[in-house]
Amino acid sequence: MPAPDFLLSPAFRTRLPQLVQQAVVEARMRTYEPAIPRMLIRFLDTAGRRNYDLELRRSVPEQRGERFAVASLNALIGNAAGIGQKAGRDTILEVDVALAYVRKFCDFWPFC
């Protein structure tokens, strides 16, 4: 099974709230806006098929899989947490994620 298959699987999208929650805890924040997983799903819906096709063109050892995507998600939430912390909050807002995403666009594969 090719590494990027998770991009087209509903299972990864279903796990996003749990993955976001884990990333929030790791970032030492209290909570997050419930809209954030839905926002990430929209990003995947927009870029998922394109990213899948691009990954399949890579050699198998170079293909990025779910582990890489989770690391990217953790980095995105970590950056968003930094924005929230600078604003004196312990909650990550959707706007924090959007700002972190814009600041480092396409550092957060497969969400771009």
Image (tube, rainbow, N blue to C red):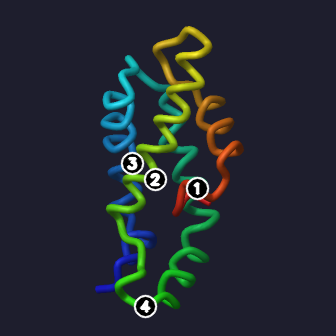
Look at mark 3 in the image and give the residue it sits on.
16
Q: Where is residue 25 in the image (x, y as percent from the top left)?
A: 32, 28
| Residue situated in front as seen by the camera: 11 or 95 | 95
Instruction: Return the disc, 3 or 2, that comes first in the chain's sequence.
Output: 3
Q: Say if 55 sits above or below 27 in the image.
A: below
Residue depicted at 56% across the width and 8% down the height: 88
Q: Do the residues labelled 1 and 2 touch (CB within 8 Å)?
A: yes
| Residue situated in front as seen by the camera: 91 or 35 | 91
**Tag 4: amino acid:** Ser
Look at mark 2 in the image and give the residue it sits on.
72
Residue depicted at 59% across the width and 36% down the height: 97
Residue placed furthest toward the top? 88
Q: In which quarter of the image is the C terminus?
A: bottom right
Q: How far apart are marks 4 and 1 (CA)?
A: 20 Å
| Residue situated in front as seen by the camera: 67 or 39 | 67
Q: Position of residue 23 (x, y in %)?
A: 36, 37
Instruction: Return the disc, 4 or 2, that comes first in the chain's sequence.
Output: 4
How packed mark 3 is, by other alpha carbons closer than 10 Å (few <14, some 14-19, many 20 or more), is some
Q: In which quarter of the image is the N terminus?
A: bottom left
Label 1: state its secondary structure.
loop
Q: Where is residue 75 in the image (x, y as percent from the top left)?
A: 46, 44
Q: Do the residues labelled 4 and 1 touch (CB within 8 Å)?
A: no
Look at mark 4 in the image and give the residue it sits on.
59
Using the rendered view, name the quadrant where residue 103 is placed: top right
Look at mark 1 in the image and give the residue it sits on.
107
Q: How far apart are marks 4 and 2 (CA)?
A: 21 Å
Instruction: Return the disc, 4 or 1, that comes first in the chain's sequence.
Output: 4
